[in-house]
Image (cartoon, rainbow, N blue to C red):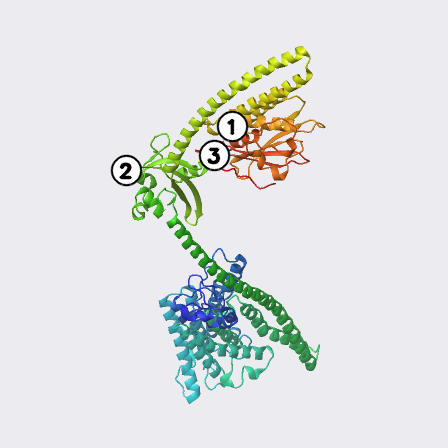
Amino acid sequence: MGTSARGADSGGVSARTALPSPGTVQIGRSARPGHRLRREWAGVAAAPSAVEPQQADSSAGRHGAPVVAELSAAHDPELARWIAAEEWAARANPARVRLIRRAAGVGGGLLALTGLAVWVGWAIGSPTLTSVVPGLVTMKWWTAACFIVLGMGIALPTIRDTLAVRRIAMGLGLFVALLALTFLLEHATGGDLGHDNAFGLDRAAGADHPGRMSQTTALCFVLLGTSLALHKVGRVRVAQAIAVAPTAIGYLALVGYVFDVSPLYSAVSLASMAIHTAAALMVAGLAILALRSDEGFMAVFSINTAGGRVARRLVPAAILMPVTIGWALDVLVLRGVIDAPFALALMVTAVSVLGVAAIWREAGGLSMIDVQRAGTVAALRRVREAEARQTTLTAALEESARRTQAILDSALDAFIGLDRDGRITSWNPAAERLYGWSAVEAVGMRLDELLPVFRADGSVLTARVDGDFLEHAIRRGPAAYAVVRKDGTIAEVESRVWAQNARDGRTYTATVRDIAQRRRAERELLELNRSLDEFAAVAAHDLRGPIAAIRVNLELLAESAVGRGDENQLATVARMQSAADRGLTLIDDLLTYSRAGRSAIEPRRIDLTELVEAVADEVSERADRSSRIDIAPLPPIAGGAGTLRQVFANLFVNAIDYCPNDRVPHVRVTAEPAADRRQLLIRVTDNGDGVPLAERDRVFEMFQRGTTSAGRSGTGVGLALCLRVVERHGGNIWIENAPGGGTNMCITLPRHFDPPATSGARARQVPPPG
């Protein structure tokens, strides 16, 4: 099936991925016994295939050698089993071939023993050994000699199959054929070569030529000797065809003895055949046929196909069943139990019924094989379709790889490919521009040998960059370094590493970005923030002074109003005092918000449960109404304790203040790992009225309050402060609906804190609702 590019129209499968050809059977020098299977699979082979044909071993087409299947792991395992079964079935079974060959050797041994027994019978004058039953035709001395020689020629190659032994066997076969040919010449010419009655042992009265081998027996020995010799020169098929004739002649003579039909074994005196001669001739023919059961037309007996199974079961039955039934009925006729016509009718009926039963049984097995074959054909077509899809996908992947390479070549960031040992496998143009080393110079070098690296604290990175180092880099996340370029200058970079699992092992890719400009901008921003912090502190001090003076004067006015009993003036002063207090609170909140965005966070391990419980106690003590705050066990995190206290304090105060007066405020705090497993998701849930969906983003902006907060105190800075603190920790905050009503404030905080390098001035990422 399509083992070369020239045969693409009948298979279309490359030599490397060629599917097996179940009909091609390797039997000796030819594959003829598989020709029917090849025709059955031809329709499947002609199915279109998208796989590009490739030139395969041309010897497979010349000699019919089987195509070896290399089914990839992507192929259907069930199909692989089916095709393997088809290949197995189309080959000669080695164990069965050895068994049949040993049977041939046993047959050769029996022939030699039979000849020796007859020699002994002639020597001691035993009619039992020479004719089996006294009065029947005898086996001649030369006939016994031919069986001895022929049996040795058959048995020797089954014991030790060497070139010398094969030559000896061929010589023995030729000797038998030539010896038998001399007797045929005597019969044909009427002459006498003087070797008929060896040693004068045959004393048969009235015989014209005592001891002479009959024409039929001599002819059989000529054929058997010739067949044995041809076996040894490789003409197995011709040898097997020749061996069939003496086998049939011996079988015919045996049938004559079984049914007492003398014309079948003794038509004339010089053509007669002894009963053990007939049996030995049949055994000799079968033994020669069994010598090479893996070649010629005898190969059908040793292969694992349905035809082989049918041959092994039906051929012996077809030979033995009629003889056995006929002999049994003949015995009944001779004893007068039944008459001949009735026996004939019984024989016809028995042979028909038993034959139909045997055929029916084999037909059932063949039907199952046809069903399996149909499934195999359908599965093979599916594989061809899958191969076509795979080719399409491969082309798409190649196109994607080309696009990806084009993107990498034009990327502004450096992309560096690394293997498990830390050696560079790819180096894009951005890496060449960043470090000054060309791809030709960099690829193959170890990264730590090519680029000296300094940490942020100025120390030299001495660790070996290998798989373990890169795996740690993946877990750590982005990191900033200072790297020495080829020209000796320093490059400030930020790198991130990720891994890919390839067929040849785990590989790594590092993206490197030049952050020199960003660092300069950060330093400028920090300087501006310090200036802004100083300005805010001065402004707060300057603003607090006048407001404090106003507050003192308002207290004096309040005392004066109390002394005069002026209720209107007292109410006015109270409103002015409340406004002054709100102004002081707003100044404090603005200062806190400003510092939260600029102050450095020193990450320390925080017992989150202890921190939240402490904040809850403080808020509950200051609140002017009773409340309930339930805190589940919370895992520890790393961060700034002071700023996180502000976050939870603001959330608890909002939950208590904005809870309707008809219920007791109830706050629940829980935590669980976030979806990426690298952050902790904290939920602060209350039983208030909740926040409308349209306002959930706006309430995190400065001076913005929700519609449900009308009539309640507040500056509109608390949630903006929470957002800034959480983002400074590398997390996020958003609002969801709480089960049963209320507000569910969701906060994500990294388990291992790595604060952002920039200030809090970045856009907030709000997760989708729900």
Which residue is tagged 3?
761
Query: Disc 2 to disc 3, how far (Cα)?
Result: 35 Å
| Residue designated by label 1 | 593
Question: Distance between the Cα atoms at labels 1 and 3?
Answer: 12 Å
Name the residue type under label 1: Tyr
Residue at 54% in and 17% down: 548
- Going from N to C along the chain, the mark reached first, 2 or 3, is 2
Helix, strand or loop at label 1? It is helix
Mark closer to the chain start, 1 or 3: 1
> Which one is in front, 152 or 484?
484
Q: Nearer the viewer, mark 2 or mark 1?
A: 1
Question: Which residue position holds label 2?
Answer: 488
Residue 394 lies in quadrant: bottom left
Tag nearer the camera, 2 or 3? 3
Against 49, is 570 above or below?
Answer: above
**Residue at 44%, 42% in the rendered image:** 498
The picture places residue 603, in percent across and down from the top left corner, at 47, 27
Q: Is residue 376 left or right of residue 63?
A: right
Q: Nearer the viewer, residue 717 or 321?
A: 717
Q: Are marks 1 and 3 in contact (CB under 8 Å)?
A: no
Residue 271, position in %: x, y?
50, 84
Is any atom of residue 190 visible in this view?
no
Element type at mark 2:
loop
Residue type for callout 3: Ala
